[in-house]
Structure formats: C-alpha cells, structure tokens
Amino acid sequence: MPKFVIEREFPGAGKLSGMELKGVAQKSCDVLREMGPKVTWQQSYVTDDKIYCVYIADSEKEVREHAEKGGFPANKISKVSAVIDGATAE
C-alpha cells in the first residue's frame, strides 16, 4: 500500500502539552478505528507550527477523508516514492 506524508499547519503545535497531544492522537485513532483497515497511521513529527504525519493508505482520498472526519488540517499530502536512510549509502 502507498505511503503518504501529510503536512498539517497547526500554529502552536510545538507548545501543546503532553495531554493535548494525547487528545489529538486519541481523536485520530478513533477515526481510524471507524474507517477500518484502509488507513494506518505510522507516526507524526511535531514542530513549532506544523505536524508532519506518515500514513499508509490505498489513496490520497482516504487520507483526506481521515483528516476531514477528525477535523484535522491536511494542507499538503505527498505520496512517498522512496524511503532512504544512512543504510542506503552502503
């Protein structure tokens, strides 16, 4: 299944408390359970004013549907064409 990176503009994201981040994660998981196995959340990276999320889904449409149902911004959705890391250089 394709992998997607979602860029979410979320002013003040880096200042969210642990409890607030837990609430965001719980909402995301609730929506994912409702949607069934067609979308999987791998992880997210929180920066000062954005959250970058990595999802596995059949299509961008499902990623967008998750965002809409959860009330999350999805300012940019990019399909991953390859994953590289330090081991790629070896």
Image: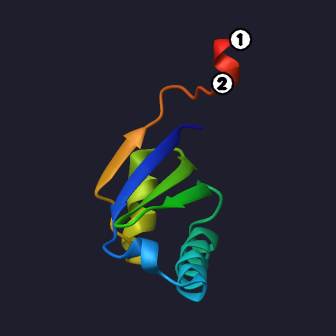
Task: Please state the horizontal and vertical placement of residue 44, each as a whole percent of the image.
Answer: 55, 59
Q: Nearer the viewer, residue 70 or 9?
A: 9
Q: In this view, does 69 lie above or below 19?
A: above
State the mark number for residue 67.
none
44 left or right, relative to 33: left
Query: Mark 2 highlights which residue?
Result: 86
Label 2 – label 1 distance at C-alpha: 7 Å
Q: Which amino acid does label 1 sit on?
A: Glu
Q: How crowded is mark 1: few (under 14 residues within 10 Å), some or many (20 or more)?
A: few
Task: Please state the horizontal and vertical placement of residue 1, each as a whole percent of the image.
Answer: 60, 38
Q: Is residue 41 above or below residue 3?
A: below
Quarter in which the C terminus is drawn: top right
| Quarter residue 71 falls in | bottom left
Q: Nearer the viewer, residue 35 or 51?
A: 51
Q: Which of 24 and 15 is in front in this view?
A: 15
Residue at left offset 54%, top offset 37%: 2
Looking at this rendering, what residue extends furthest in the bottom direction? 19
Task: Please state the horizontal and vertical placement of residue 77, each as a whole percent of the image.
Answer: 36, 48
State the mark number for residue 90.
1
Q: Residues within 10 Å of mark 2 (few under 14, many from 20)?
A: few
Residue at left offset 28%, top offset 57%: 75
21 left or right, relative to 61: right
Question: Regarding mark 1 in the picture, which secondary structure is present there?
Answer: loop
Question: Regarding mark 2 in the picture, which secondary structure is present there?
Answer: helix
